[in-house]
Amino acid sequence: MSDYQFLKPYTFANGATVRNRIVMPPMTERSAFENGIVSNDEIEYYRKRAGGVGIEITGCANVSELGKGFEGELAVNEDRDVPQLARLAAAMKSRGAKAILQIFDAGRMTNTAILRGEQPVSASAVKALRPDSETPRELSEEEVETVIKDFGDATKRAIKAGFDGVEIHGANTYLIQQFFSPHSNRRRDQLGGTLDQRMNFPVGVVEEIRRVVDKYAPSTFIVGYRISPEEIEDPGIRIEDTLTLIPNLIESGIDYLHVSLNRVWQTSLNNKTDTQPLIEKIQNVVAHKVPMIVVGQITKPADAEKVIEDDFEFAALGQELIREPNWVQKVVAGDEDSIRYELSPSDLDELGITAPLWDFLNGPFKKTIHITNA
């Protein structure tokens, strides 16, 4: 067995212990039923990848019908979703992983077709800067309070389903990020305008989830938060804004911070003269008050080990775990030479990759997933 540091266990401040520092991050797999209920194919997909990692996080699950972002997306917006979610949680936990349900609201990053005729909603009536985007309707203050409660209700369902935790999706341009961003949030009430006011919605979501967890969950239930450090829009989120938000998230009760990046060591998208990796800037603010999960083209054992050696608590392997569900097991067995770094169409059944997921991988991720012609 290897003596890699990433194979050592970790114990959270709340007492939850995970067997190692390798995380399967949330990834889109588009394999739920039309109404958002977990399919048996999804359950098997996650089961196959739960045998080695310390933490396994699902793809995003919407907390309301208006929060749906794409077809085949998980839902946790009704009590009817709980039985199949419970089967999913049990499958993930059955092989030793901590099972985390990621919860989100797409906000303006959806369309009327996906919402079956309803107009998308957001912090303000501002279109996203992407092709075919639609102008959303601005949420009223009362509706915002309902959305915050939706996150709490979704958390209560996750607890009932037996998950070990939830991850709040505050990244990748979805609704929580839309409220924090000066591009998408042009409000002039207590939910927008200044940086402090733009923090009210993300902090409010965390506080509501913390309230529900403290009331209904075991003490070891984990509350994580995923964040995107910057935006390229002008105006948009800059790293200085994020470094102001993070202490407020920690104070509100998150148990870990998950930094969403394309490349784990990438530097600022906006300040090309700054050579310090974004995760190091964030690490200086977090200062180990909560653990950090970092992600972005971590594929080989040496990549994951560098993350831990540089004093980050968790390394997340995304696309590599699609290609190689047994990555951790092969490292433990000293069989690194057999780790799969390419995805062959002939391996889809073995890997539990569904037709919708295969189509998705052949679209936006074709250049990065390393698909062979076999």
Image (spheres, helix red, strand yellow):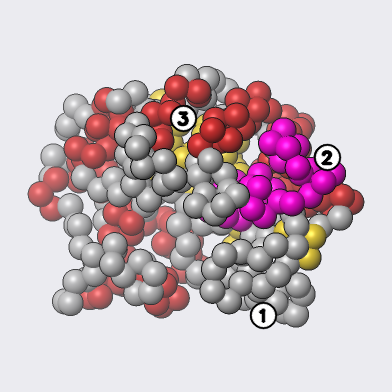
Which kind of residue does numbered mark 2 sit on? Gln
The numbered mark, 1 or 3, whose residue comes first in the sequence reads 1
* Residue 33 picture location, percent across and down: 59, 73
Instruction: State yes or no: discs 1 and 3 in contact (Cβ < 8 Å).
Output: no
The residue mark sitting in front, 3 or 2, is 2
Q: Which residue is mark 3?
A: 282
Which kind of residue does numbered mark 3 sit on? Ile
27 left or right of 164 in image: left
- Considering the numbered disc 2 on the image, is that residue within a helix, a strand or a loop? loop
Circle on res. 190: 2
Using the numbered discs, state the Cα–Cα distance from disc 1 to disc 3 in whole angstroms: 38 Å
Find the residue positioned furthest to the right. 142
Count every numbered label the image shows and give the total: 3
Circle on res. 51: none
Q: Is residue 258 above or below residue 32?
A: above
The residue located at (77%, 75%) in the rendering is 118
Is residue 335 one of those drawn in magenta? no
What's the magenta region?
170-198
* Residue 208 picture location, percent across and down: 76, 38
Using the numbered discs, state the Cα–Cα distance from disc 2 to disc 1 in whole angstroms: 32 Å
